Amino acid sequence: MIKSVSKLITGIIIFVVVILLAGGYLGIVPGLSSVFGSDKPRDLGIVFAPGDTLAAQSKTGVKLMALPKETAISESIKFEGKKDVTFEMTSQELSALANNRPWKYYPFSQVQIRVNADSSVEAAGLVDITTLYSYVQALGYEEKLVQEAIQKLPYSPESMPFYIAGKGFVVNNDISLEVNKLEVGRIEVPKEFVSEAKVLVIDALETFMDKVSGFNAESIQVSDGKVHFKGTVPETEATVN
């Protein structure tokens, strides 16, 4: 799976990006091309090591398996089984998971996730636009949303920086989300636009969680500089690598 909490955070990013693009906001921002030309995401100061990936994978306990390379995109990620887990993750562990995904169609790179002392969370990184099409298709959403959005841009970017900051929690897969700041292509999106999109984002995320067989977030809370998860996760995740 897109490991529990890490899955939730990257899910927030992808659906916010898609909705903003589909809304046409980016297509009318002056000087967008030059901004997208700077393809480096924000540096949140999170440095992680291979040990952080191993520690995070051990906490979720999900067994990773490989599917045949000829598997169709729509079948390229599968989940089986269910087990109860309770764990907490640091910024380093979350960032390590977000950057070490074997799935061929995972579109994120250079991701940093920072959990702050005030219980807010920040995430920054790059989205590969080509892989984004396959990612959306594999998760059962309409690829045309991305296609229509990209057509509204002054040109077709190969990758796009993002940054999101906010607070939130989950109870029984019911999401409460507050987005304090959002940047797409290093441009800050007006708060009124983010507010309008938030309801759609939450609906999309809750549907997204329902699609993952064996996943249930009884509780996701942020405190003491860590993300705390209680619920169930699949026993195995199989992907095309």
Image: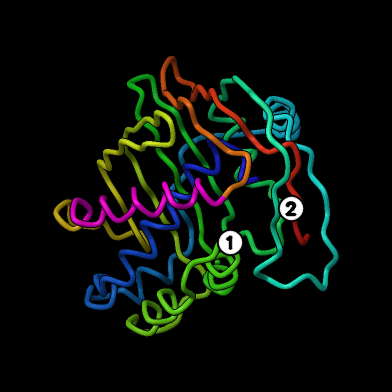
Does residue 206 appear left or right of residue 235 in this picture?
A: left
Mark 2 Cα shell of 10 Å, populated few (<14), some (14-19), many (≥20): some
Q: Nearer the viewer, residue 189 or 40?
A: 189
**What residue is disc 2 on?**
102
Residue 202 falls within the magenta-colored stretch? yes
Does residue 146 appear left or right of residue 201 in this picture?
A: right
Amino acid type at circle 2 is Pro
Question: At 53% across and 25% down in the image, what residue appears?
Answer: 229
- Residue 181 picture quarter: top left
Question: At 64% across and 24% down in the image, what residue appears?
Answer: 84
x and y percent of residue 221 in the render? 42, 23
Secondary structure category for the residue under label 1: loop
Secondary structure category for the residue under label 2: loop
**What residue is disc 1 on?**
107
Q: Nearer the viewer, residue 186 or 120?
A: 120
- Say if residue 95 shows up in the picture: no
Question: At 24% across and 70% down in the image, what residue appears?
Answer: 25
x and y percent of residue 32 in the render? 31, 74
Magenta segment boundaries in residue numbering: 194-211
Does residue 156 appear left or right of residue 154 in this picture?
A: right
Amino acid type at circle 1 is Pro
Question: At 54% across and 47% down in the image, what residue appears?
Answer: 111
